[in-house]
Image (cartoon, rainbow, N blue to C red):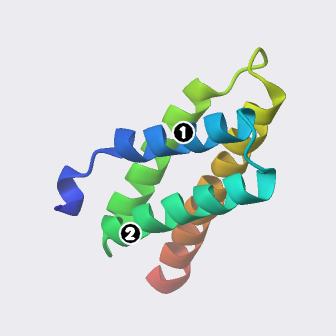
Amino acid sequence: MNAYQLDIEIFALQLRKHAAAHQTGMCLQEAKFHVDLTLQQMKEVLGKDKVFQVLKWNELLAMLDKFNSNTQDPMWRTVINHARFRVKSRRSTIIHARRRFKD
């Protein structure tokens, strides 16, 4: 799959499945492991273009914000919040690295 034709919805759907699995009985540690694994797979697919990576991480973050609300089950929110935290961390790392090597 070409990174520039990447469909972020596939990864967002997988993250939702992990949240639903935790909500239906999967332990939190296992759900977080699967979230991290999914995000690692996305990172590998994105390629080396840092600008493109930031755009796609922002796109995924926007999708995750849609899945998270105060009326959701707390178990669901825990997994989605973990995913949001990891996406923000990856995005911040890329932005910081770009600034650092740009100078």
Q: Which residue is mark 1?
A: 17
Q: Position of residue 68 (x, y in %)?
A: 67, 27
Quadrant location of the N terminus in the rendered image: bottom left
Q: Residue 42 sits in which quadrant?
A: bottom left
Q: Residue 35 sits in which quadrant?
A: bottom right
Which residue in the rendered view is the most extreme toward the top? 71
Q: Position of residue 43 (x, y in %)?
A: 43, 67
Q: Is residue 3 left or right of residue 94?
A: left
Residue that appears at 48% across and 85% down: 101
Residue 48 sits above or below residue 71 on the image: below
Mark carried by residue 1: none
Type of amino acid under label 1:
Lys
Q: Which residue is mark 2?
A: 50
Q: Position of residue 63 (x, y in %)?
A: 49, 33
Residue 63 sits above or below residue 71 on the image: below
Few, some or many C-alpha atoms within 10 Å of disc 2 (few <14, some 14-19, many ≥20)?
Answer: some
Few, some or many C-alpha atoms within 10 Å of disc 1 (few <14, some 14-19, many ≥20)?
Answer: some
Residue that appears at 51% across and 60% down: 39
Residue that appears at 23% across and 61% down: 3
User: For numbered disc 2, what is the local secondary structure?
Assistant: helix
Residue 60 sits above or below residue 34 on the image: above
Closer to viewer: mark 2 or mark 1: 1
Q: CA distance from mark 2 to mark 1?
A: 28 Å
Type of amino acid under label 2:
Lys
